[in-house]
Image (tube, grey):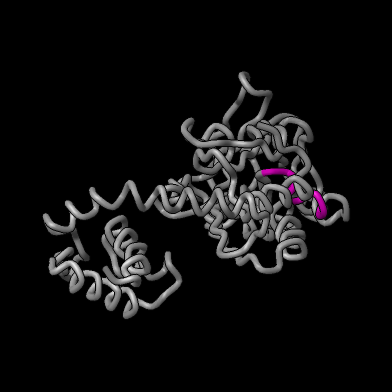
Amino acid sequence: MRQTLLSDLPVFMAVADLNSLTAAASRLGVTKSAISQSLRRLEDELGLRLFHRSTRGVHLTEAGAQFLALVEGPYQALGAARDEVQAVSGAPKGLLRVTAPSVVFDWLLLPALERLRTQAPDLRVELDLNDHFVDIVREGYDAGLRLVEAVSPDMIGRRVTGALDCALVAAPAYLATCPPLTVPEDVLAHPCLVWMIKGRPVSWDFGPPGQVTRLEITPALQFSTHHASIAAARAGLGLAYAVPRAQVADDIASGALVEVLPGLPTPLPPLMVYYSSRRHVPAKLGAFLAALNIAGGLIRA
């Protein structure tokens, strides 16, 4: 059996998982043409057709499904062995794939990445910023960051923060001319600048956990990114709900934004970094966890 068969197996596994040459190429960081060539080599080596190809994607043939069942266990064992050796060697290198909410980038991930760049210069990082939960095993990520309540119980998780305060904010010029706000319901008389995720508004909650009042907001303006809603508030267009408060801490400190009804917005659960269950943490992941610890403070099991 050819030595290059081992180099073709990751391609086969990625295409079998994603049912797409394009998606597999993106995951592995190669061209679609390279994916096709690798599959042809593997099929020639085995003398079998492993995939049905159509305009709708690629799907395993019966022989391909049988081959997958036979090689999947040994392939995962090889990956685990590689990770354990890397963990022992203490040399963080290769590609680290991380997924996280966009709202944690500026105040948490950017300082961590700066530290990581200094401590592990040979490590490459691919950071996917999105606001929905990601199955990191299925999609090939090394780690993810999400609120504790969103993390699957079969993941290994470490808290990166305590509970996250939120804040209602507006520009000083806007507040100088608007009706006063003394209770959460007063918000409804103001133009609200709302962040939307998948077509749904992020909730504006007030009160301590267990006694939450959720306002039914009619957006004056709605945005697909949190940064846009905060920028609109900074420009004096109305009220914005900062999720979490760390997003606007510098603006509040500088006076560019004023905190309205301070202490009343409901805190979010702690943020957690999660990864798949392994006996040993790979060196590249260990380096990332250490960088988060420095940037974000608390990490505990």
Q: Residue at point 72% right, 41% down?
A: 167
Q: Nearer the viewer, residue 209 or 23?
A: 23
The answer to whether residue 61 is above or below residue 216 is below
Decide if residue 258 is on the left or right side of residue 233.
right
Please, what is the dominant secondary structure of the magenta stretch?
Answer: helix
The answer to whether residue 212 is above or below residue 64 is above
Which portion, as a residue range, is magenta?
A: 244-251
Circle count: 0
Q: Quadrant of the C terminus?
A: top right
Viewer can see residue 235 = no
The quadrant where residue 26 appears: bottom left
Q: Nearer the viewer, residue 274 or 193?
A: 274
Decide if residue 152 is on the left or right side of residue 129.
left
Q: Quadrant of the N terminus?
A: bottom left
The answer to whether residue 298 is above or below residue 35 is above
Q: Nearer the viewer, residue 44 or 29?
A: 44
Give x and y (percent) for residue 83. Answer: 53, 51
Decide if residue 219 is on the left or right side of residue 58.
right
Give x and y (percent) for residue 75. Answer: 36, 53
Q: Is residue 118 magenta?
A: no
Give x and y (percent) for residue 242. Answer: 68, 46
Q: Residue at point 19% right, 60% down?
A: 59
Q: Residue at point 34% right, 72% down?
A: 4
Give x and y (percent) for residue 207. Answer: 68, 25
Residue at the farthest front position: 1
The answer to whether residue 22 is above or below residue 220 is below
Viewer can see residue 36 = yes
Q: Nearer the viewer, residue 135 or 15?
A: 15
Residue at the farthest right position: 254
Q: Residue at point 77% right, 59% down?
A: 115
Q: Is residue 250 magenta?
A: yes
Decide if residue 176 is on the left or right side of residue 57.
right
